Image (tube, grey):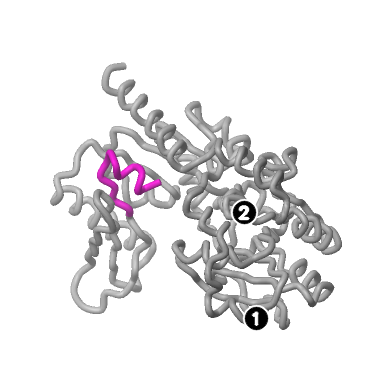
Amino acid sequence: MLSRFAKELKVFFVEEPIFDVKEGNDFIKKEVKQRNITVLVPHLVPGRSAELHEQALAALLEDFILENKLSNVIAWYYTPMALAFTQFLKPIVTVYDCMDELSAFVGAPPALKEREAKLFKQADLVFTGGISLYEAKKDYHENIYPFPSSIETEHFGQARQLLRDPEDQSQIGFPRIGFFGVIDERMDIELVREVAQLKQEWQFIFIGPVVKIDPANLPKSSNVHYLGMKSYKELPQYISNWNVAMLPFALNESTKFISPTKTPEYLASGKPVVSSAIRDVVKSYGSTGLVNFFGNAREFIAAVEEALRQGNDKQWLDSVDQELAKNSWDLTAQKMLSLIRAKISIESYG
């Protein structure tokens, strides 16, 4: 999204602060990623209260905006927690990009719900990361729009060719059932453990960081493989050498409103998908037969067996392409920018 917005706007992305200043004052490190995209990383003195950290962030950002003479600012919030250090802004449009029900996540800040309520009042536009999240939030704002997960079809479409198997995956046997993404409290660990025990001839591959859960609790067996973080650029090479892609999410509060981006990315890669019954995945793909759903270990196994057959079905792949043609990050960016432009016109001339 940022690279697409940058074709028309200057984009400044503020990262989470790093508390590593041992001598001297707080500062912002500026890194230009590509034309019109600058990442700002605040570096702060550690050990202060949360309130003082927020005051320090606000001072750094306000100084940066003044020094760089930035005007006509569009404020784009991924988290309501950022309100605490951006109240000095006078944006021409405020967007709340509500990607998840963040309050349902482990370790969510106590102030999150209160700040979200405040952000709903300040926002001119609200975008949600899926249909279920839209339905849950639609009564909180008059200008709220759902934007389910989009895809870069060309990037993931590379996986439809047989690419060279990466070294750390090349010694793993087949069939391979793979997952990429954050491994956290949303993962149904016990389900994976049970299926891995029942189908020891299948190989289960996980790509991504382990976050907010104890790695010691993850399934440990010879047919479960954790390959760690990989870059976005590397993903097609890994996926190309899988047989099936999986979404083994638990059905809990943290997954109630998610709309996994990886679903269309798996499909664009030409891989059959098995998934737990995540509401947005069922709504998007339940009636098309493009995704195989499961509720327990036995159903997981049956879904993978069906997916293994789908992998050689040209008619299934044609149906995938017809569905994916309706969706892209380009279209999403265009729709979002149109809504922002319309809002600016209303504010300017309404």
In-front residue for pair 14/300: 300
Callout in the foreground (1, 2): 2
Q: Quadrant of residue 168?
A: bottom right
Label 2 SS: loop
Give how far apart the Cα atoms at labels 1 and 2 are: 33 Å
Label 1 SS: helix
Residue 197 appears at what percent x and percent y?
Answer: 81, 76
- State which quarter of the image contains the C terminus: top left
The relative height of residue 344 versus residue 333 in the rendered view (above or below) is: above
Q: How many marks?
A: 2
The residue tagged 2 is 270
Please check the rendered image and state whether residue 10 is part of the magenta-colored stretch, yes or no: yes
| Residue type at tag 1 | Ala
83 on left or right of 146: left
The residue tagged 1 is 216
Please check the rendered image and state whether residue 328 is part of the magenta-colored stretch, yes or no: no
The residue lying furthest to the top in this view is 350
Find out whether the residues at labels 1 and 2 contact each other: C-beta distance under 8 Å: no
Residue at 19 percent of width and 53 percent of height: 64
333 on left or right of 175: left
Residue 11 appears at what percent x and percent y?
Answer: 29, 47
Residue at 69 percent of width and 66 percent of height: 177
Q: Which residues are magenta?
A: 1-13
